[in-house]
Image (cartoon, rainbow, N blue to C red):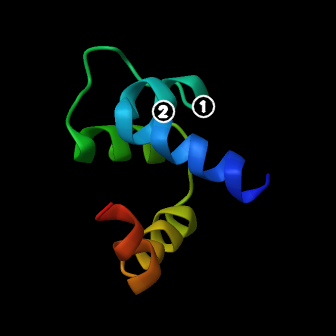
Amino acid sequence: MNLSGLMNTYQQFKANPMQMLMQRFNIPQNMNNPNEILQHLLNTGQITQDQVNQAMQLRNNPIIQQMMKR
């Protein structure tokens, strides 16, 4: 994916995160609490704890934090 495609995906996610997540993962429609969703994804094996840890590290990256402020 090129930078333009990545930015487009980011804008779509920012506009409607649940829609983007539901395209990729099996999340019950009545679930909207981020912690519940995360636990569901872990419990059903759709993601691993290592993936969660990597995402948390990215979230703390200064470059990513700067992008999220836009």
In three-dimensional space, the C-alpha distance between marks 1 and 2, rounded to whole angstroms, equals 5 Å
Question: Regarding mark 2 in the picture, which secondary structure is present there?
Answer: helix
Task: Provide the residue designation for mark 1.
Answer: 24
Choose between 22 and 10: the one closer to the eye: 10
**Residue at the top extreme, as displayed:** 29
Q: Residue at x 70, y 46 (%)?
A: 5
Rendered image quadrant of residue 13 = top left
Task: Provide the residue designation for mark 2.
Answer: 21
Q: Residue at x 25, y 43 (%)?
A: 34
**Residue at the left extreme, as displayed:** 33
Callout 1 environment at 10 Å: few (<14), some (14 to 19), or many (20+)? few
Q: Is residue 43 above or below residue 23?
A: below
The amino acid type, in three-letter code, at marker 2 is Leu
- Image coords of residue 30 (percent x, y): 25, 15
- Image coords of residue 70 (percent x, y): 33, 60
CB-based contact (under 8 Å), mark 1 and mark 2: yes
Question: Regarding mark 1 in the picture, which secondary structure is present there?
Answer: helix
The amino acid type, in three-letter code, at marker 1 is Arg
Q: Which mark is residue 39?
A: none
